Amino acid sequence: MTKEIQMDLSTEQREEILGVLKARFEKHMDRHEGIEWAKVEAKLEANPEKLWSLNEMESTGGEPDVVGYDVEKDEYVFFDCSAESPKGRRSVCYDREALESRKKYKPENSAMDMATDMGIALLTEDEYRMLQTLGNFDLKTSSWVQTPANIRKLGGAVFCDRRYNTVFLYHNGADSYYAARGFRGSLRV
């Protein structure tokens, strides 16, 4: 299934990803009004596996940023905030079952497997729509989102994009993949 992954970052890698995240946090304060970086950083320092996941999000082009705080669970919520679907996560079908069902021209991976390996979750449709309230994302690309079981059971999967100043939800065979379709992830810390 998925490969065994080493989830440790060196001191240098930790400092580098924290610096990138802090700079992005400060540049886009409109995404997380009322949230203090020092509290986010303390949570990240206490959860090195989450910092590793954020580093994976960053290294695949996701540009993760804080988009909210769940008061009940005391968790900060990160989403991929790259303008387009992350480059390092495109040309993938939806899940392992879809990947294995392809007879010819298989993609290298699936969105669900990659997300699992990274320790993140695909955005839900509602999360994707919330992200779009923070800016204009996926104007040229599209992103797989979590697919309801009843649709997946019938061989389909869903994805979203933004066109004509509107967020659209579409369907496709779960085994399909395109150079301009990837996936966006979420992480709670």
Image (cartoon, rainbow, N blue to C red):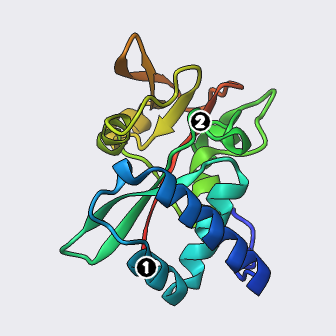
Residue at 59 percent across and 74 percent down: it is 51
When the figure is inspected, residue 159 is found, relative to residue 70, above or below; the finding is: above
Residue at 36 percent across and 69 percent down: it is 76
Q: Quadrant of residue 7?
A: bottom right
In the rendered image, residue 137, in percent from the top left (x then y), is placed at 48, 31
Which amino acid is tagged 2?
Answer: Ser
Secondary structure under tag 2 reads loop
Mark drawn on residue 85: 2
Secondary structure under tag 1 reads helix
Extreme-bottom residue of the structure: 46
Mark nearest the camera among 1 and 2 is 1
Most foreground residue, 4 or 76: 76
Most foreground residue, 9 or 18: 18
Quick check: 97 left or right of 145?
right
Q: Earlier in the sequence, mark 1 or mark 2?
A: 1
Residue at 66 percent across and 25 percent down: it is 180
In the rendered image, residue 23, in percent from the top left (x then y), is placed at 57, 60
In the rendered image, residue 102, in percent from the top left (x then y), is placed at 71, 32
Mark drawn on residue 68: none
What is the distance, in whole Å, between disc 1 and disc 2 at their CAs? Answer: 29 Å
